Amino acid sequence: MKKTDIPFSEYINEWLYGNDGYYTKYKNIGKKGDFYTAVSASKFFGGTIAKHIISLVDDGFLTKDGIVCEIGAHHGYFLADIIEFIYTLRPKLLKTLKFVIVERFDELEVKQIEYLKDSFGDAISLTHFKSLDELRCKSAFFIANEIFDAFACELYFKGKTARVDAHNIEFDIENDWVTSKAKKYHKSMGEIAVGYEEFALSMAKSCEKFEFMSFDYGEMQARPDFSIRVYENHKVTAFFDKDIKRDELYKNSDITYDVTFEHVKDAYEEAGVKFVEIKAQMVALVDMGILELLEILKDNAETKIYEQELQKAKMLIMPDFLGERFKMIKFRKDNSYIYDKNIAGLKL
């Protein structure tokens, strides 16, 4: 390759996380941002997770003094919603649970600390870590919203991996690792995520016993084509659109792709963490009790407030918005898993 050429994974990593990268600075999400998330749609997303956390404590899986950790918390709204509903449903737990955010960017960490301090004062214990490698605990619940679509990826097309030169894409690199993943997931073209394996192993080593839940868009099996696209002011542009101006969009817009959940599953199982289930977001939220929470609101709030929150919550579970396209994937590790450096993973 020429000096100006870089693998696509480096290009997208720089776009999102390099100097002045898209995710390194605070961005509005929702109506005034580039895209919507479940967090921006309704507080009952975090509320439903809070209800689930309480059930984990009641079942004895999560200790009362365990950790609730969000990975990549943006402004802190999601964790704040979770805390607010824990306070409403089981206030005593706020005195014992420890809240953690894994956030690598200083500017976002400051925003999160300020927001949670303004929201809860000294009522909660909050700690920040730059990465999962810094965290060591015995009992935890990990939550992440739209994290796996934000990993760097390589682009693969009929046996070749992409390189980038001045925002132009060329498929002419031989990459055995990418090719092996493409064959494993039956892809002749598309995105191959980079970093799932390291992320899963870091989480597996961070805690003796945990449940990890994540929400993202994609399918269990890989798509047979390219899904990579750019979001700007709620306008979606396919990355290979003939009219796209990559140089103008670079670092100023979100770039993302559909998650192959089978790859996520394999990464965690290779790290010795048990795959529990994958469900459509609407099914997962209903199973965890979002409708029961709305009934509680109906019985205790004015009709106008209830109807407003109901309409927002519908965005989470309606098939034509976030309910079907987004999936919940869940994993568990208990303390019978022991790290073994000889196999670079975890074993029973």
Image: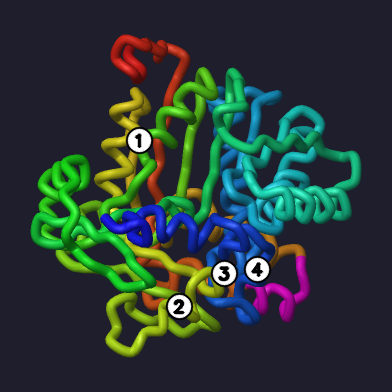
Q: Which residue is mark 1?
A: 197
Whether tag 3 and tag 2 are in contact, CB under 8 A, the answer is no
Question: SS at mark 4?
Answer: loop
Q: CA distance from mark 1 to mark 3?
A: 34 Å
Question: SS at mark 2?
Answer: helix
The three-letter code of the residue at mark 3 reads: Ala
Where is residue 122? Give x, y as percent.
90, 40
232 relative to 47, above or below: below
341 relative to 78, above or below: above
Q: Which residue is mark 3?
A: 313
**Residue at 66% from the left image edge and 41% from the top image edge:** 101
The three-letter code of the residue at mark 2 reads: Asp
Front label number (2 vs 1): 2
Mark linked to residue 27: 4
Q: Which residue is mark 2?
A: 247
Boundaries of the magenta span: 301-309
The three-letter code of the residue at mark 1 reads: Glu
Toward the front, the furthest residue is 3
